[in-house]
């Protein structure tokens, strides 16, 4: 039975309000966050870390560890936005909340040169090396090609 992420996933119309503290500098705009939400929606969207942590605790067939342990062991990544931690859900098999090995392999290829937001964006946006297809859409059907594109982009980022 698929996991219901209706309340955990972010949608553009549900994004958290910006903080009132003007000293907080966002690394990405509302429009970029909205695009991330839209682009990742077909693959499970993005979930608030607190909501996902509760889902993992309540799901007997899940990843087998708390979200904190998954992050600490580098099996899952997320990014902060205005004090809320967000986790791209393509990292999980949504029906069982198990770690998706393909996503983990590709992320490992990018991690040295990309921060978490950049990794999420990389998966979500069309990639020239993939003939303008999105890496997240090809994880299951063409992992080798996605890994090759990740290597190319890592080499480019490293200069």
Image (tube, rainbow, N blue to C red):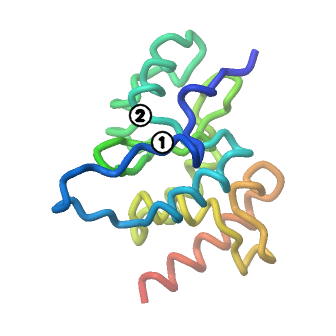
Could you say which quadrant of the image residue 131 lies in? bottom right
* Residue nearest the observer in this picture, 34 or 70: 34
**Is 36 located above or below residue 48 in the figure?**
below
- Residue closer to the observer: 10 or 139: 10
Marked residue nearer the N-terminal end (1 or 2): 2
> Marks 2 and 1: in contact by CB < 8 Å?
yes
Tell how many labels. Answer: 2
Residue 102: percent from the left, percent from the top?
65, 48
Q: Residue furthest front?
A: 20
Q: Which mark is residue 49?
A: 2
Q: CA distance from mark 1 to mark 2?
A: 6 Å
115, 34: nearer the viewer: 34
Quarter of the image that includes the N terminus: top right
Classed neighbour count for the residue bearing mark 1: other residues with Cα under 10 Å, few (<14), some (14–19), many (≥20): many
Q: Assign the C terminus to one quadrant of the image.
A: bottom left
Residue found 57% across the figure and 66% down from its top: 122
Pick out the residue farthest to the bottom.
Answer: 159
* Vertical comparison of 71 with 27: above or below: above
- Give the number of the disc on residue 54: none
Q: Which mark is residue 87?
A: 1
Question: In the image shown, does 62 or 125 lie closer to the viewer?
Answer: 125
- Residue 146 location, x and y as percent? 70, 64
Find residue 156 and report its horizontal and vertical position in percent.
51, 85
Which residue sits at x=60%, y=28%? 98
| Residue occupying image coordinates x 71% and y 71% | 126
Image quadrant of residue 147? bottom right
Q: Residues within 10 Å of mark 2 (few under 14, many from 20)?
A: many
Location of residue 36 (image quadrant): bottom right
Name the residue located 55 percent from the left edge and 63 percent from the top edge: 121
Tag 2, which secondary structure? helix
């Amino acid at each position: 039975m698929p996991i219901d992420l209706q309340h955990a996933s972010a949608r553009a119309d549900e994004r958290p309000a910006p903080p009132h503290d003007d000293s907080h500098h966002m690394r990405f705009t509302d429009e970029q966050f909205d695009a991330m939400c839209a682009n990742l929606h077909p693959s499970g969207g993005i979930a608030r870390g607190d909501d996902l942590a509760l889902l993992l605790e309540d799901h007997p067939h899940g990843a087998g560890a708390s979200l904190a342990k998954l992050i600490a062991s580098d099996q899952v990544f997320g990014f902060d936005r205005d004090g809320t931690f967000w986790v791209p859900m393509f990292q999980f098999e949504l029906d069982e909340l198990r770690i998706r090995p393909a996503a983990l392999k590709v992320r490992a290829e990018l991690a040295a040169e990309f921060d978490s937001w950049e990794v999420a964006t990389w998966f979500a946006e069309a990639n020239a090396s993939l003939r303008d297809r999105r890496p997240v859409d090809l994880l299951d059907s063409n992992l080798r090609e996605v890994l090759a594109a990740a290597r190319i982009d890592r080499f480019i980022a490293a200069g």
